[in-house]
Amino acid sequence: MTYTKKQLPKYCHHKSTDRAYVRIKGKTFYLGKYGTQASRREYDRVIAEFVTNGRQAFLDPDEILVEQLIIKFIDTAEAERNYSADRIAKIVRILRHLDSLYGAQPVTSFTPAALKTIRRQYLDRNICRDTINSYMQIIKHVFDWGCEEKIVPAAVAGALRTVKALQRGRTAAPEYRVVGPVADDAVELTLPHIKSLQVQDMIGRKLVIGQGHTQPINLFPSTIATPQVFATIITYEASGFFVFFLLSILRRCLCRGSFV
């Protein structure tokens, strides 16, 4: 049965037992003794959950499959969550692997052993430890979301959270290769080939001031109004780029306020 926006399942009387009930898409919910305030409150609760669920039938966790959970999560992530396209693509890639192994199984049958089976496959592919841990966290998050939406029993989601992340030095999974800093000479040779003057500005500022990779966009006058920084800039003033760099800094400072 399809319900309109104004039409809701009715509060009904089961005469033989004198109980109140409401029937939603073929499923009966008993509410308590008919005519009582308690049964009315229970009716309001069931209807509120029905409306919040998009006026869809409540799903029995013993009947919903992992593939259905995946579809519902992805639909919600794309429609309601502020995920980037890259984030969505990563989630879909991980859940596609989950679906290929356990999509036809009920969500209630997905145990910590099943999660470890997926992790073992990633280990066999020689994927880095941090990456495997992030993949496992996404799968756990999907089941936590299903628990929040009353699709997955709390016991199932809670059991998955007991699976600990892989620890450094205690697993065969490799670590990320440490990438060292690029030599200043290589950076200066690269700068002329960067088309964006703004990016050139940020890289040059990082070289001179020694900021982190996210800090050049947050420069304030007090950051550069020091004798050491100006001495460094003067050292490189023979380069046309650093003349542009200095003018760029001064322009930004004038926009943000005086040197104080």
Image (cartoon, grey):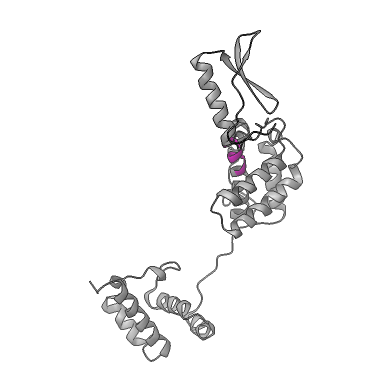
Q: Where does the image place residue 34, in percent across and percent down from the top left? A: 56, 12
Residue 154 seen in the current view: yes
Q: Residue at x 74, y 42 (%)?
A: 102
Residue 128 seen in the current view: no
The residue segment tinted magenta is: 142-148
Q: Residue furthest left?
A: 260
Q: Residue at x 28, y 71 (%)?
A: 222
**Above or below for 231 versus 146:** below
Quarter location, residue 219: bottom left
Which quarter of the rendering shows the N terminus?
top right
**Above or below for 206 versus 234:** above
Which quarter of the rendering shows the C terminus?
bottom left
Position of 146 with respect to 219 (left or right) is right
> Between residues 55 and 144, which one lies in front from this camera angle?
55
Give the main secondary structure, helix, strand or loop, of the magenta stretch.
helix
> Between residues 180 and 72, which one lies in front from this camera angle?
72
Magenta segment includes 201: no
Total number of numbered discs in the rendering: 0
Quarter location, residue 126: bottom right
Position of 160 with respect to 118 (left or right) is left
Position of 246 with respect to 202 (left or right) is left
Q: Where does the image place residue 259, in percent across and percent down from the top left? A: 24, 74
Q: Residue furthest bottom?
A: 238
Q: Residue at x 69, y 38 (%)?
A: 113
Q: Where does the image place residue 9, in percent across and percent down from the top left? A: 62, 26
Q: Where does the image place residue 62, in percent across and percent down from the top left? A: 70, 30
